[in-house]
Image: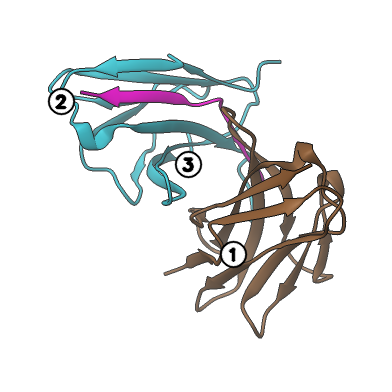
């Protein structure tokens, strides 16, 4: 069975600083990987996804993530964050033959001025 | 084009009461999902419907029932609410087809409190 672990529950950073949100997954088969963002009192929306091909994936709002198969990781990065990036971020995994998406516990990113 | 809509936005129930959460989509997607979100636990799948006329249990189905009324609508029913069902409930939709790397689109959520 697939599983996802987000290694940090809260990440506080200052505006314009770089940030990395860490995600590790576990699966015995090939997977698709996703990062979703949830702004306060809203539903989730897709930031980016890895399906195949280049291991560096670029998403919306300047975020990018790198798929590392040997370390079973899919960390999310942004070189310079803004106040508006304050939100909860969820990593998710789906086996390529599966129908269910499994979410991590979430990481609350707080950007301070 | 509303996307995914959920009603109600907020609800307070007493233990033992029943209610139905409604979800509708205008995206012509085949697959629909119900999740619950609890602090520190991410989103957990309650039930899903891969297509009209089919439903399957997810990770935490106990205490819930679902109905896929038609392609657009997927409802979640709590027959006898319990305080453990206090949560935020999200409906999501996804286009069908392989590979299953489609994006899921989420509604705004229903905040349910069971006293």
Q: Do the residues indicated by labels 1 and 3 lie within the same chain of the protein?
A: no
Q: Which corner quadrant holds the N terminus of chain A? A: bottom left
Assess disc 2: are there few (<14), some (14-19) or many (≥20) residues with their C-alpha within 10 Å of its C-alpha.
Answer: some
Residue A12: image location, x then y, percent: 66, 53
Q: Do the residues indicated by labels 2 and 1 lie within the same chain of the protein?
A: no
- What's the distance in space between the residues labelled 1 and 3, CA to CA? 16 Å
Residue B96: image location, x then y, percent: 60, 43
Q: Residue at x 53, y 34 (%)?
A: B92
Q: Residue at x 82, y 51 (%)?
A: A59
Q: Nearer the viewer, residue B106 or B12?
A: B12
Residue A24: image location, x then y, percent: 58, 71
**In this rendering, does residue B75 appear at all?**
no
Q: Residue at the bottom extreme?
A: A70
Q: Which chain is cyan?
A: B
Q: Disc number at residue A96?
A: 1
Q: Disc number at residue B80?
A: 2
Q: Residue at x 63, y 56 (%)?
A: A11
The kind of secondary structure element at disc 3 is: loop
Q: Nearer the viewer, residue B81 or A101?
A: B81
Residue B27: image location, x then y, percent: 65, 26
Q: How is the image coloured?
A: by chain
Identify residue for label 3: B50
Q: Which chain is brown?
A: A
Q: Do the residues indicated by labels 3 and 2 lie within the same chain of the protein?
A: yes
- What chain does mark 1 sit on? A
Assess disc 3: are there few (<14), some (14-19) or many (≥20) residues with their C-alpha within 10 Å of its C-alpha.
Answer: some
Q: Is residue A42 above or below residue A35?
A: above
Location of residue B61 (image quadrant):
top left
The kind of secondary structure element at disc 2 is: loop
Q: Is residue A64 left or right of residue A9?
A: right
Q: Which residues are magenta?
A: B102-115
- What chain does mark 2 sit on? B
């Amino acid at each position: 069975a697939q599983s996802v672990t987000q290694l940090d529950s809260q990440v506080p950073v200052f505006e314009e600083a770089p940030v990395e949100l860490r995600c590790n997954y576990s699966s015995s088969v090939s997977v698709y990987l996703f990062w979703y963002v949830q702004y306060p009192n809203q539903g989730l929306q897709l930031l980016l996804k890895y399906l195949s091909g280049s291991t560096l994936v670029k998403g919306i709002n300047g975020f990018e993530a790198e798929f590392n198969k040997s370390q079973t990781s899919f960390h999310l990065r942004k070189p310079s964050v803004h106040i508006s990036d304050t939100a909860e971020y969820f990593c998710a995994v789906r086996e390529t033959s599966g129908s269910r998406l499994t979410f991590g516990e979430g990481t609350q990113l707080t950007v301070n001025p | 084009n509303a996307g995914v809509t959920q009603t109600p936005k907020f609800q307070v129930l007493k233990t033992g009461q029943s209610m139905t959460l409604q979800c509708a989509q205008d995206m012509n997607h085949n697959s629909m999902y119900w999740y619950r979100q609890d602090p520190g636990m991410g989103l957990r799948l309650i039930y899903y419907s891969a297509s009209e006329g089919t439903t399957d249990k997810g990770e935490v189905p106990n205490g819930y029932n679902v109905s896929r009324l038609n392609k657009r609508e997927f409802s979640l029913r709590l027959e006898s609410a319990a305080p453990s069902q206090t949560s935020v409930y999200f409906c999501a939709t996804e286009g069908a087809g392989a590979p299953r790397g489609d994006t899921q689109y989420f509604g705004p959520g229903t905040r349910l409190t069971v006293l």
